[in-house]
Amino acid sequence: MSNKNKASITELLRASKLSITDTRVKILELFMNSNGALEHSSFEKLAGQTFDRVTVYRTLQTFLDKGIIHSIPTTDTSIRYALCKSDCSEHDHHDHHVHFKCEECGTTTCLEDTDVPEIHLPKGYAMHNVDVVVSGVCKQCK
Amino acid sequence: MSNKNKASITELLRASKLSITDTRVKILELFMNSNGALEHSSFEKLAGQTFDRVTVYRTLQTFLDKGIIHSIPTTDTSIRYALCKSDCSEHDHHDHHVHFKCEECGTTTCLEDTDVPEIHLPKGYAMHNVDVVVSGVCKQCK
DNA sequence: ATACTTATGCAACTTTGTTGCATAAAAATT
DNA sequence: AATTTTTATGCAACAAAGTTGCATAAGTAT
Ligand SMILES: [Mn+2]
Ligand SMILES: [Mn+2]
Ligand SMILES: [Zn+2]
Ligand SMILES: [Zn+2]
C-alpha cells in the first residue's frame, strides 16, 4: 500500500467524521487492494485474527451508513461489499452500476461503466433504489 | 386451500418426479397462500413446529433444483423464495421479472409484468442470469 | 495533560446453515 | 396386498454467522 493511498484513507475517514483507527484503516486497505467485492469472512481471512469479528460487523455497518461502501445482494447468504466512488455520501449514492458475479471463480465485481437501466414500475410503487446483479462467466475465466 | 389447489400441488410434484410428502405439500401451500416471497424462517413460523428445520432447507433446495421456486437476492442475510410460473423447468427458467422489496412493510414481491431490461455487458463477459431487485414503497404502504 | 467521546474486544448468546445416520414414509415390484 | 427398493424425514451434534451489553482502550477535543 502506497503512502498516497494511506493518506487518502485518512482523508476519507476524516471527511466522514470518523475517527481514524487501525481496524478502519486496515479494512479500507483490504478494499482498495482487492479487485472484487468482499464478504464478511474475507476480512478475517485476509487480515488474520487481528481484529474481532464484532468489530468487523460494526465497521462495515458504519461504512455503509456513511456511504463509504455499498452492499451487493446475493442468494448465497454472504452479502458482498465494495467501495463507493468518491462522490457518494451518507444519503446520496451515485454508483448506479451493474454488478457481476462469476460462476467460475466466484468473484463479484462492480461494472462501473455499465449503468443500471431505467425500470418502469407498475402504478403505485415508489422506487428508491435498483440493484442489478448479473451472473455468468467473467473475462478472466473465459 | 381449495381441492383444486391441492390437486395442482400433487400434479406439480409428480411432474417434477418428486414423491408427494406432507412437508412438500405444506410448503407449497404456504407459497400459494402467501402474496409475497418467503424467507426460511417464515416456514417455521407459518407452519408451526410441524417439521424440522433441516427438512425445510432440503425441501427448498430440492424445489430450487427442480425449478419449482426461484430465489431472490437480498442484502439482509435472508434469501427470499417465490414460486416459479408453471412453464419453468429444471434448467429453463422463464420468470425474468423484476422483484420489489418494500422498505415499509418488508415484503418482497414478484412484479410478474415488469420484465428485466436488457443489459449490455462489457466485452468478454458471458451472461447467464440477471437479477433486478428494486427497493422502495409498495402500493399498499403508500 | 486531562477530560470527553467513540471504538474495540470479550463473553455470552441467538440465529442460521450443514452433515451423518437411523428410521419412516412413499413408490415400485412381485 | 405384501414385500422390496428408493427416497425423505427427524434427530443429534456441530459449524458458521450475526447480535448485545458492558468494561476497557484508543482517539479527539479542551
Ligand atoms: Mn458496486
Ligand atoms: Mn419472482
Ligand atoms: Zn471469473
Ligand atoms: Zn409495503
Image: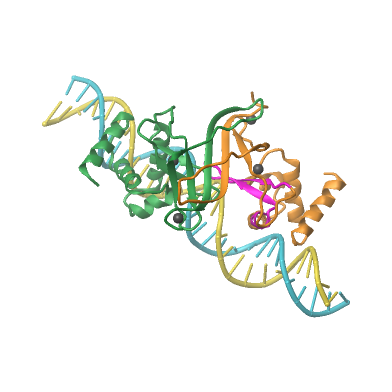
Chain colours: A orange, B green, C cyan, D yellow
Q: Is residue B15 above or below residue A93?
A: above
Residue closer to the observer: B125 or B13: B125
Q: Is residue B78 above or below residue A62?
A: above
Quadrant location of ligand 2?
Answer: top left
Image position of D4 (left or right of A49): left
In the image, farthest residue toward the front: A123
Residue B79 in view, yes or no: no
Name the residue: 51% across, 55% down: B103
Please give the count of numbered marks on the rendered protein. Answer: 0
Residue A98 horizontal/vertical position (percent): 62, 38
Residue B101 horizontal/vertical position (percent): 49, 50
Residue closer to the observer: B36 or D5: B36
Q: Quadrant of residue B21?
A: top left
Image position of D17 (left or right of A13): left
Residue closer to the observer: A47 or A39: A39
Name the residue: 28% across, 43% down: B22
Residue closer to the observer: A108 or A45: A108
Image position of B31 (left or right of A27): left
Residue D17 horizontal/vertical position (percent): 56, 49
Q: Quadrant of residue D28?
A: bottom right
Magenta-colored span: A61-85
Residue A64 in view, yes or no: yes
